[in-house]
């Protein structure tokens, strides 16, 4: 029995990693209705920035808030420079633009850092294993669970219980009315897009230790992130969290009990959820 | 009438143009040059590997010049973008033969890419030297293939042999679920069982799997003496090796055995202390103490930068060039396909990895396979060779 619990804890940690990387996409896709396939590129940017900072001697834990802020700022800059012109365009145009952006940023990473894998130095505090409540857990996985839970709680509070969150939801539901009552929608969207990018950057920085990092990162993990958002329901923080945790644990349990099922399981899960609930577990009907 | 005649004529001319233009038996250029078509994965996820081959070739030319037997050597390089692009590899091969009129091909990092060109090479009568693609059967698909790299059965069977003879009685196998993985599983198991070992469990993992914790949990509960693993290198293998450390496989008393490509020299800094005590079988490691290897590493660093580390891929490309250069010399400076192929058969080279021979019958490589242990030497993680299996042929070939 304790073995199964250990498997579930591993799966939850992996799910938290997916959540941290995907939740920013859920924000831009669900709240802003912008199809941002360049989301993985922001995660990649966060990963590279963390590697550079840690290589320069900065402690890993200190590099995380810097990555969050820096990638958030660059997200705002990119939103101002290009993406804001696309909000009213068709879905196809948004897809083409953002996938083009992702490819360009991947090529840039290749130019600057080369095609090889990058490694990040994790402090000894976060490596090795630790016993919690009689369970033997890898410290880094425990750290991911804590980070994921903290992020989820913060975001739910931000969007559900603050004026900022109310403004966003108002601006998305009825932009003209929101502008009419004095909400500065342009600025609001820029900040929200920046927040999505910042979350991606944080997720990317935390991914390097477990998933590695190379210029293909931006597109390699896009599928699984889109799956999290699709299963959870775009725009729902709690939905993304649920979806990521379900994907992580189901994947882990099948790998343990029925490895023959291979990579099929999570895709089967995606199909099943979307058949029953086309807008995801927590999605609002469009 | 007039119209149909004209269209018939047009069709005939088109047909003729096609027949002339696309006949693969087009002759090589009759000039005094050695033209080598090079096909490597130079963009995309595997461009890191492509760069190793490219720099291995450059290192060879730096040491041995750009002329051979009086012929200037011209390299014409194409990018096949990695595996799963067999169609592209075939098209590029065709283009190199027809338009660029190359005398020989050097390339193919991946099995499907090599396989897709087998019939083409036969029709066009051009030799192709395989720089990596390691599935056993490739060289049997065309008499124009010569392999200078390695085969998975070569490493896996040697390791199975070693394990059974060194106190390991039970093994769990874990391979990536694709052709090379199945080759590795089959040949490790065959050699291990033939020498008295017992396989107590096996699992095939999805090729892109990055999360190994649940699989490893199962292994630890099964309590075998050792885990044998193969996966496709790059980020997947680094993630696997880190996971074995995180799960503390060694602490559970389970030895880790892998084919050498999983712990290739270039990825050792990424794997870090996950390499501690890991046993691997491979045909090359940086630490081989020969003059040839020192010369090779120095030339590679001159080309790629002082911080760059060559791995087995760079060595294989280096040897492919050496094989072709030596074959041209042996063939009296002529570049005809039959002459080159005959010259390569049975040829022995002094490679940075040690002596290698191209088997005259199978055109496949015969080489020493090193058994290594992961150790920290002078502050750097390395694979230190402690036992050598001499002149190992590909066990996948039917003995004649």
Image (cartoon, coloured by chain):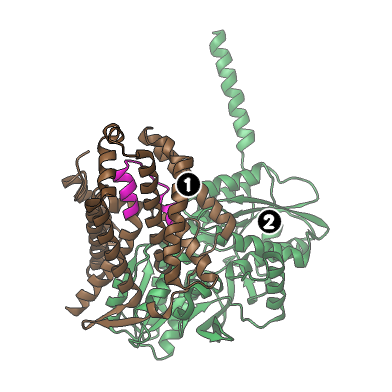
To which residue does mark 1 refer?
Answer: A77
Q: Chain of mark 1?
A: A
Where is B240 relative to B324, above or below?
A: below
Tell me the quarter of the picture where residue B305 sits: bottom right
The correct choice, above or below, for B13 with respect to A127 in the image is above
- Tag 1 secondary structure: helix
Q: Which residues are magenta?
A: A23-43
Tell me, what hue is chain B?
green
Q: Are marks 2 and 1 in contact (CB under 8 Å)?
A: no
Give the numbered dot on residue B338.
Answer: 2
Whether residue A37 is in magenta: the answer is yes
Q: Which mark is residue B24?
A: none
Q: Residue B182's x, y, as percent?
A: 39, 67
The residue closer to the viewer here, A78 or B200, is A78
Around disc 2, counting alpha carbons within 10 Å, would you say few (fewer than 14), some (14 to 19), or many (20 or more)?
some
Which chain is depicted brown? A
* Residue in the image at 62% along x and 28% along y: B16
Closest to the observer, B233 or B13: B233
Both marks 2 and 1 on one chain: no
The magenta stretch spans residue B153: no
Q: Residue furthest top?
A: B1
The residue at the far bottom in this view is: B167
């Amino acid at each position: 029995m304790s073995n199964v619990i250990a498997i579930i804890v591993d799966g939850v940690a992996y799910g938290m990693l997916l959540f941290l990387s995907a939740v920013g996409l859920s924000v831009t896709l669900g709240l802003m209705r912008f199809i941002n396939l360049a989301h993985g590129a922001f995660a990649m940017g966060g990963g590279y920035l963390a590697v550079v900072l840690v290589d320069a001697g900065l402690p890993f834990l200190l590099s995380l808030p810097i990555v969050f802020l820096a990638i958030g700022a660059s997200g705002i800059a990119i939103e101002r420079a290009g993406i804001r012109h696309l909000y009213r365009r068709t879905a196809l145009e948004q897809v083409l633009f953002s996938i083009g952006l992702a490819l360009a940023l991947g090529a840039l990473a290749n130019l600057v850092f080369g095609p090889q894998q990058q490694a990040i130095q994790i402090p000894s505090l976060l490596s090795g294993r630790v016993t919690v409540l009689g369970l033997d857990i890898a410290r880094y996985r425990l750290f991911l669970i804590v980070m994921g839970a903290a992020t989820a709680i913060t975001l739910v509070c931000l969007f559900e219980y603050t004026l900022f969150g109310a403004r966003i939801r108002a601006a998305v539901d009825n932009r003209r009315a929101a502008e009419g009552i004095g909400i500065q929608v342009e600025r609001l969207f820029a900040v929200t897009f920046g927040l999505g990018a910042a979350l991606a950057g944080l997720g990317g920085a935390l991914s390097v230790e477990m998933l590695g990092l190379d210029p293909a990162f931006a597109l390699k993990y896009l599928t699984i992130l889109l799956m999290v958002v699709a299963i959870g329901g775009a725009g729902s923080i709690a939905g993304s969290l649920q979806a990521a945790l379900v994907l992580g644990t189901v994947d882990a349990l099948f790998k343990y009990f029925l490895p023959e099922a291979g990579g099929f399981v999570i895709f089967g899960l995606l199909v099943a959820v979307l058949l029953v609930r086309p807008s995801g577990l927590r999605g609002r009907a469009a | 009438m007039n119209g149909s005649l004209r269209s018939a004529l047009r069709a005939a001319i088109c047909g003729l143009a096609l027949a002339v233009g696309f006949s693969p038996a087009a002759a090589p250029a009759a000039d005094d040059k050695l033209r080598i078509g090079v096909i490597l994965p130079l963009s995309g996820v595997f461009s890191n590997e492509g760069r190793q081959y490219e720099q291995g070739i450059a290192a060879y030319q730096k040491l041995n010049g750009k002329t051979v037997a009086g012929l200037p050597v011209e390299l014409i390089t194409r990018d096949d973008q990695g595996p799963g692009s067999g169609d592209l590899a075939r098209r590029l091969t065709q283009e190199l033969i027809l338009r660029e009129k190359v005398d020989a091909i050097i390339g193919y990092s991946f099995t499907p890419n090599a396989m897709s060109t087998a019939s083409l090479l036969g029709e066009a009568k051009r030799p192709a030297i395989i720089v990596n693609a390691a599935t056993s059967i490739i060289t049997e698909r065309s008499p124009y293939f010569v392999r200078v790299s390695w085969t998975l059965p070569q490493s896996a069977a040697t390791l199975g042999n070693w394990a059974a003879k060194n106190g390991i009685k039970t093994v769990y196998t874990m391979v990536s679920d694709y052709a090379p993985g199945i080759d590795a599983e089959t040949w490790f198991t065959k050699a291990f069982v033939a020498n008295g070992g017992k396989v107590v469990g096996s699992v095939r993992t999805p090729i892109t799997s990055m999360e190994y914790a649940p699989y490893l949990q199962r292994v630890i509960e099964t309590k075998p003496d050792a885990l044998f693993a193969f996966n496709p290198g790059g980020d997947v293998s680094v993630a696997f090796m880190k996971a074995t450390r995180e799960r503390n496989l060694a602490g559970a008393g389970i030895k880790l055995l892998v084919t050498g490509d999983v712990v290739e020299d270039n990825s050792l800094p990424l794997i870090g202390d996950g390499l501690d005590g890991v046993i691997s079988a491979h045909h090359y490691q940086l630490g081989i103490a020969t003059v040839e290897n020192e010369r090779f590493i120095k030339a590679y660093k001159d080309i790629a930068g002082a911080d760059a580390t060559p791995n087995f891929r760079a060595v294989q490309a280096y040897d492919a060039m050496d094989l072709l250069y030596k074959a041209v010399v042996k063939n009296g400076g002529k570049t005809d396909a039959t002459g080159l192929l005959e010259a390569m058969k049975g040829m022995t080279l002094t490679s940075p990895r040690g002596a290698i021979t191209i088997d005259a019958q199978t055109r496949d490589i015969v080489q020493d396979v090193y058994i290594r242990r992961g150790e920290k030497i002078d502050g750097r993680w390395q694979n230190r060779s402690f036992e050598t299996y001499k002149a190992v042929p590909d066990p996948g070939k039917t003995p004649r």
